[in-house]
Every structure is written in structure tokens, then in C-alpha cells.
Image (cartoon, rainbow, N blue to C red):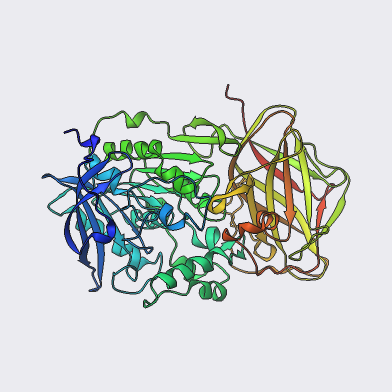
Amino acid sequence: MNKFLGRPDLKPTHPNDTKPGLNKIVMTTAHYGNQEVIMEKDVPIQMRDGVTIYVNIFRPDKPGKFPVVMSMDPYNKDGLPPYETFRQVWPTVGTIVTSLFAPFESPDPGFWVPNDYILIKIATRGSSNSEGDLYPWTKTETQDYYEVIEWAGVQEWSDGNVGLNGVSYLAMTQWRVAALNPPHLKAIIPWEGTSDLYREWYFHGGIPETVFSSEFEKLQHTRWPNNNIEEMVAAQKEHPLLDEYWEERAVTLSDIKVPMLVCASWSTQGLHNRGTFEGFKQSSSKDKWLLVHGRKEWETYYLRESLEQQKEFFDYFLKGIENDWMDTPRVRYEVSEKFYKGHIRIANEWPLPQTSYSEYYLNGVEMSLQQEPVRNETRLTYNAEFGQTENRDLRFTFTTDKDIELTGNMKLKLWVSADDTDDMDIFVGVKKYDRRGNEVFLPDFNHLEQGQVSSGWLRVSHRELDSVKSTPYQPVLKHKRLLKLNKDEIVPVEIEILPSSIFLKSGESLVLVIQGSDIIIDDNPAASRGYGHRQTVNKGNHSVYVGGKYDSFLLVPVIPNQH
């Protein structure tokens, strides 16, 4: 019988009915019907320091040696998939169809095993039934991953080729272990994963993130109440600068040499967006590909189209199948037009080599963005304290008279001062408006439906630039010391605005928003399950200076017409 026709005559096995050890199960898959699969549950692997961690192994029910696909996280190696877990709480996660044996953000054995791959799910130490303490993204956790890769590479059912795959935490662990270059690791698929914890998760432009970080920690404590779990929110308060605490978790992306298929999203700004692009850009891998979409994270990962791309990549690098994978364009990205509407472009590298960076100067009289420098100096003020309804932001508009694609990093240069305090937190948003003056919403952080084009943040005392890492279009901050404001001091700042892609038709507008608190969340109170910054330093009024000697401008990445 054709294996892809499935076995409707067999009774499916529920994950709760499996036992530690060898299980012969019937898995109801999303694509191949009922499939007979071997599941080895709670397989112990002893680490170098004597700690035992446990893995689940899913294998084809037939003789032979197969390549191994694995993922590692602390969520629950025996958990149900995200649609089962989050459906009632988060109605906006999208349509996610998997077998019941696909844990949160993980490759689905119901897809991979019928395609003759072995799938291994690793529970980090301190999670599920693995021994030890849960300290996320540390060198200890990374070394554990290395050891499991090497263990899997020499098992009797393994052909010695190991690939890594998974979303979010499961991508973040990939960056770290791939930088160690384990001998049996042949390819990785980091699908949306932060690579710089300080800049991309716990501090945005130096402003502490206070909502998602605590929710993440609460989830671990709720799930593993008897385990020792690192208190990273407390550490965030104790380590406000980029010191040895954060550097211990840093990854040298240039050490990665393994082939990679990287997926980034315009819509995970404030978590995975920046780090995924950095992982692709900074790695030393000769063979690397970048997919970029502007949609929902998990839904996109589990789409059949995405699975087939992942499989084609692994078929080439893990199985050695000649399938013309090497003809695949190195960069394939979606240019967003509106919610779930866009078009696909291809390129040879990232950032896009044909990018023309254009300066749009802030005009404080017309509240517009213009390409010629503004002559007259203007001082503009807004009330920066949280919860304001009057004069809470500054908005500058540019309306295009031709079709235009903007893809890449934007940068905002501002001259600023604060009236009543020695520091300021600045929140920046870029929005699209249609020809009728309505905002065009896009998918955003954590599946939010009323998101904007792009975001940026800065705590002004963190404004010192890292001259080695910064480029003309992407300022990178050092975060090593605080440069507080003197009374009445006006300072220039450069704000990194995260990678995005938007298409504006003639007559449509781009709007730059500057304010003292979270832009999307202030506009959408129901969005509190995203990121948040509730511990700002803001007090009273902020001033922005434009025109004349104050060359405040928005730098935008214009892509020449490709028709």
C-alpha cells in the first residue's frame, strides 16, 4: 500500500496513551492519514556532568538508517500542539494543522517520519522530566545540545546526518549550538529566532521589556513548579547594561558554518525579527537561504508550502538527493501591501544590494516628511508620560506620487531634549495609510492583527553608538554606559528601526509616529499579550528639534522598480 494513502482501518493513538520506552503507535497525520510509527518515549541521555536529560524519538516503522531532525526547548516535550494549547486564549494564532504529537513550535513527526526522517524532541535540563536546573540559553544548555547531536549521530538507526529545525526558542538554541560546529550537524532551519537577547528581547533600545519577559518566566514556573529556574526578570533589573551576564549568553554568529535555511518575519518585531536577519547576515555559512514573510509565525511554519521547502532543503543536505535545491534563490521575501496581501520578490543577498537609502527630513510646520532639507528650525513638544490622551505624540506624513517599495532597515535621526528629567524613552512607529486616510494594519508581534509597518525604541542615555557594528542605515548601540542629559541639553540620537517591507501605491502615505509609550498597545488595549515597557524614565514633556542645524530625518530603503 502507498504509505502516503494512510491506514483508515487503524485506530489512532493519543499521546496520553503512550508509555516510557518503545511504543508502536498509529499517528493521525495532517497530510498522510494514519501512519504506523515507532515512538521511543523518555529515552535517557547522560551529560558530561552526570545530569540525565530525556528525549522522545519518532522513527519510521521499518529497517534502515535515516537522517535525524531534532529540536530543543523547555516548554514540554510531551505537550500538545499550539492550536490545542492556545486556541481558546489566543483566537488569532491562525490555522495550525498538525498531528497531536507535534509539541509547541516543534517539527511535526506526522510530516517528517513518513518522509523517512527520524525526529528527536529534546527537553532542556530542568524541563519536562530532564534533571538539572533550567537556565535558558546558557553555555551549559548549548553544550547539552551538542552532546545530544553527537549521540544521535552514532545510534544504530541513524545515518550520521543531523539537522535542526524549529521556531522561536527552538531557533535560538540552533544559533548557539551551530556556532560550536558539532561534527554530525549537517544543516539547520532556524525559523524566527532572536540571536541577541539583550538588544532584541530584554531591552529595546535600552528600555527594559516588562510584559513578555515576565510572561515567559511565569510560564516556566507554572509548568515546572518544583524545578530550579533562573530568575531572568530579576537579573534584567540587576543588569541594565550589556555586561557579562548578557555576554555569557551571546552567540558569535560568524562561527556558524553549516548550511542554513533561515526564515524571518516582518511581524515579530520586538522579539525575533532583528535577530533572525542578523543570524543570516553574520553567519559564515557558504550555503544559506533566507525566506521572509509578513504573516503569522506558527501558521506559516506549518503551512504545507513551508514544510515542502524545509523538506527539499533537508533532502539535499541530509540525504544527498539531487533535487535542484541549489537553484533556489538565496533570498525570497514578501513585500507587504496590506493584511495578508503582498507579493514575492527574489534577490541574491541581504540587505538587498540595489537598495537606495533616501533621507526624508522632518518638517515641523507642515508635520510632513520631505526629501529636501528643511530650512526653518522648529521645536516640537509632546507629553511623554504614560496614559496621556492630549498631545501624546508627534506624527509626520509622506504621501507618495508614484508606486514605491521600501524594504530593509530604516533609521531615525532626531535632535531631542527633556524638560523635567535627565533621561528619555522614545518609541517610534512607522505606519501605512491608504488613499482615503485609513490606517493599513499588518500582522504584528505575537499574532496581533492591528500592527504597524515597523518599530524602533531608544532610551536616550543609551545613545552611544558602537562604531564597529553600526552602518549608515543601521545604528547599533553599545549599551555599556549611561550618558544622562544635562538641563536644557539638546542631543542628536540615531534610532534603529527594525527591518520591514511595505509597498505604497501612488497616493498612499507613510506616517512616522514619535511618542513616550508603546504605540500599538496604546492604540489597542487588548494587545497586552505582546511586548510592553511599563518602567519608562519619562516625565513631563519631550522636545524634538527639526530644520536648520537640526537635521532630523527618517532614512528609508527604496528598492528600484523591478518590473
Q: Look at the image and tell me whether residue 41 can be seen.
A: yes
Residue drawn at (58%, 64%) of the image? 209
Q: In which quarter of the image is residue 341?
A: top right
Q: In this view, does 515 lie to the left or right of 233?
A: right
Q: Where is residue 504 in the image (x, y as percent from the top left)?
A: 67, 33
Q: In which quarter of the image is residue 478?
A: bottom right
Residue extending farthest top? 563
Q: Position of residue 407 (x, y in %)?
A: 59, 38
Residue drawn at (30%, 53%) of the image? 101
Compared with residue 11, is residue 16 higher up or lower down, i.e. above or below? below
Q: In this view, does 313 lie to the left or right of 534?
A: left
Q: Where is residue 450 in the image (x, y as percent from the top left)?
A: 63, 48
Residue drawn at (53%, 66%) of the image? 213
State which quarter of the image contains the N terminus. top left
The residue lying toward the viewer, choosing from 419 and 60, is 60
The residue lying toward the viewer, choosing from 212 and 238, is 212
The residue lying toward the viewer, choosing from 205 and 436, is 436
